[in-house]
């Protein structure tokens, strides 16, 4: 017979926080990558392409 | 998105990885579009030349350097990149017309870029670097050496003088130089 593991309040709070963590990480990483992608396209369209064709 | 189990975490991370692959593919597509549809490519000419006898070659003798309009109307500027100057130091090219720049080096690796344009290539001894472009804006454009070539590298500069097409007047030999007025 296996005893139930006693989960403390602290551990319960930590588990709850970890459940929500991906949302925060996604927001941060998503914002960072989104800004970088935006910067890349701004430079591509407003600096690189206007500088003309080169072959 | 909340993760209730470890499987949720794996699923979220997998979706993130797929999203990042998508970002990379979008950037790649933009580069391919620029290359294939608008003809903006890295110059990739592969042409060999003996760097030790550049001054004796037909093309890169000193008298043949600079801008010349060929019998077929092709506008070609030939420049030698050496330690620590470009020869000639100034070339004239017309705006709005397709031009070709050809570079050779007798000594070490140099690199050139023309400021404000996408003209950018290495100049490697033993090879002729060739770039085709069409300048849109007139003016004196700076062309520095951008590959460290020695102690005088920072002073290695040339000028590309882009003039309106109606002011681009070759002489009887088809040559145009900065000294002409």
Image: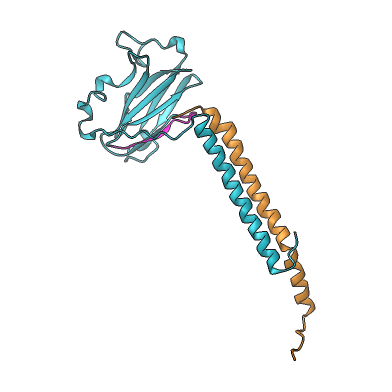
Chain colours: A orange, B cyan
Rendered location of residue B120, percent (x, y): 43, 33
Locate the N terminus of chain A and report the quarter of the image it occupies: bottom right
Q: Is residue B26 covered in magenta? A: no
Q: Extreme bottom residue here?
A: A1
**Residue A28 in the image: above or below residue B178:** below
Q: How many marks?
A: 0
Left or right: where does residue A17 sit relative to residue B129? Answer: right
- Magenta stretch, main secondary structure class: loop
Residue, x 68% and y 68% (percent of image)? B6
Locate the C terminus of chain A and report the quarter of the image it occupies: top left
Which residue occupies the foreground of this view, B37 or B142? B37
Left or right: where does residue B12 sit relative to residue A6? Answer: left
Which residue occupies the foreground of this view, A27 or B108? A27
Which residue occupies the foreground of this view, B43 or B153? B43
Q: Extreme right residue here?
A: A9
**Residue B131 in the image: above or below residue B12:** above
Stretch in magenta: B115-125
Q: Is residue B116 covered in magenta? A: yes
């Amino acid at each position: 017979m296996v005893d139930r593991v006693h989960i403390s309040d602290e551990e319960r709070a930590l588990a709850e926080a970890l459940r929500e963590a991906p949302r925060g990480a996604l927001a941060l990483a998503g914002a960072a990558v989104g800004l970088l992608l935006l910067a890349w396209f701004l430079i591509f369209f407003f600096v690189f392409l206007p500088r003309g064709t080169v072959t | 998105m909340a993760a209730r189990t470890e499987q949720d975490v794996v699923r979220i991370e997998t979706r993130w990885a797929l999203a990042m692959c998508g970002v990379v593919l979008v950037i790649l597509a933009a580069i391919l579009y620029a290359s294939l549809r608008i003809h903006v490519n890295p110059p990739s000419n592969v042409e060999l030349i003996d760097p030790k006898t550049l001054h004796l070659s037909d093309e890169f003798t000193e008298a043949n350097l600079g801008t010349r309009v060929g019998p077929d109307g092709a506008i070609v500027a030939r420049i030698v990149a050496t330690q620590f100057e470009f020869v000639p130091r100034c070339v004239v090219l017309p705006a709005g017309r397709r031009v070709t720049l050809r570079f050779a080096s007798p000594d070490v690796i140099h690199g050139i870029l023309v400021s404000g344009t996408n003209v950018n290539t290495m100049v490697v001894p033993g090879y002729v670097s060739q770039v085709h472009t069409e300048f849109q804006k007139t003016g004196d454009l700076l062309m520095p050496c951008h590959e460290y070539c020695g102690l005088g590298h920072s002073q290695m500069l040339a000028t590309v003088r882009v003039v309106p097409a109606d002011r681009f007047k070759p002489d009887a030999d088809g040559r145009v130089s900065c000294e002409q007025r």
